[in-house]
Amino acid sequence: MHHKAMLAIACTAVLSACDSEKAANSIAKRAPLPLPDAGVYEANLLSRDGDGPLKMIKGLEGLALVYPKGDGEQRWGVWVENDGKSITSSQWMGQAAQKENKEGIYPVLLERTSVRGKRLDAQSNDHNLISFQDKAVTDLAGKEVKRWTFDFSRTGTQFRDPDQSTALYRDWSGHLAVNKLATRTISCDSWRVAEDAGFGDAMVGLIRSTNNGGSLTLEIEFPKAGCTLTGKGNAESGKGLSKLNLSGFGKCSFKASSDLNPLENKWMLGLAKAKEGAAAYVAAFEMPETRKTTLVVGFPEQHGLMMVGEKY
């Protein structure tokens, strides 16, 4: 299944390795990892020449999701797909504890999963990480702008093959910048997630949204699993993401398949373990690249599953 170029968030610092470790350990003992407000963000992969300025890389733009804080943790995720010579899909999933552990530290976990065809490369990092707000970044027009920036390099910038490791994304330094996007009222519409949405073996089919005076309902087709999940909640105008409680899992048969790539199979197995009432978050926004109204649905507890659809 072909997904649009997507990115979501993960956090570390643009510091030297030594200074970063000291700063991270110091800050982590005082407060949870700072993250941008919950919502949908435009995200840009960045290059850097030595200690030079961070620069956005053309063709590697995407989106970011930051989920609302929970009682014990806050989650976020990053997905990116490029259509270069070697199509590489990646997701970074993060968890930032909101309560300190016995050592007085607020733990952070960042996990990367990357796929090329049927090959998978995964790496995780559980160091204490920090993030920077208002970092100077050179945008695609050559203008200096201020962005919230992160460093993913500790989860690797190489795709590790048995024979040879190659760059995940050309010129990528491991850094990422994000910029919050305005969300729109979710209307009564149908949304197409992937090119194969009309086929019976598609992982995801159409998504149908209904907004009845702020009471929001989503019906998400999963043709391959033989079911439709229904999400209900309240439309949170102006807050970026609306929470939905999902039902219908008992009628689904979520299984791994040779037809799917390793990341899609990871999502399917996450859905297989989900229970009635599982949470999803939804928002509508204008895609920066196409200017089209777009729907995004994120499943923070199902191995990072996230889907994006345009009006059908």
Image: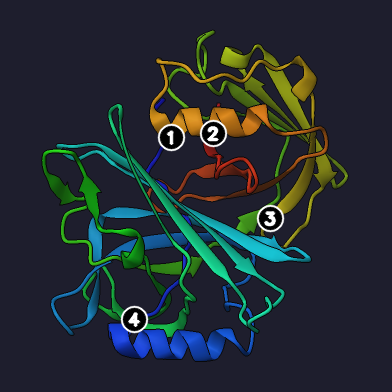
Determine the CA span between mark 1 and mark 2.
6 Å
Residue 267 numbered mark, or none = 2
Q: Where is residue 20 in the image (x, y as percent from the top left)?
A: 37, 85
Q: What residue type is labelled 1?
A: Leu
Q: Which amino acid does label 2 sit on?
A: Trp
- The residue that mark 3 highlights is 241
- The residue that mark 4 highlights is 14
The disc, 3 or 1, on the residue closer to the chain's N-terminal end is 3
Determine the CA span between mark 4 and mark 3.
28 Å
Q: Position of residue 66 (x, y in %)?
A: 59, 61
The residue at the far front in this view is 102
Q: What residue type is labelled 4?
A: Val
Determine the CA span between mark 2 and mark 3.
21 Å
- All told, the count of numbered labels is 4
- The residue tagged with tag 3: helix, strand or loop? loop
- The residue tagged with tag 1: helix, strand or loop? helix
The residue mark sitting in front, 2 or 3, is 2
The disc, 4 or 3, on the residue closer to the chain's N-terminal end is 4
Q: Where is residue 149 in the image (x, y as percent from the top left)?
A: 41, 75
- The residue tagged with tag 2: helix, strand or loop? helix
Asked if the residue under mark 2 is in contact with the one under mark 1, i.e. CB atoms within 8 Å, the reply is yes
- The residue that mark 1 highlights is 263
Q: Within 10 Å of the Cα at label 1, are there few (<14), some (14-19), or many (20+) other Cα atoms?
A: many
Determine the CA span between mark 4 and mark 1.
28 Å
Q: Quadrant of the C terminus?
A: top right
User: Looking at the image, which residue is at 65% across and 64% down?
Assistant: 74
Asked if the residue under mark 1 is in contact with the one under mark 4, i.e. CB atoms within 8 Å, the reply is no
Relative height, residue 82 to residue 103 (above, below): above
Q: Which is more toward the observer, 263 or 189?
A: 263
Relative height, residue 55 to residue 2 (above, below): below
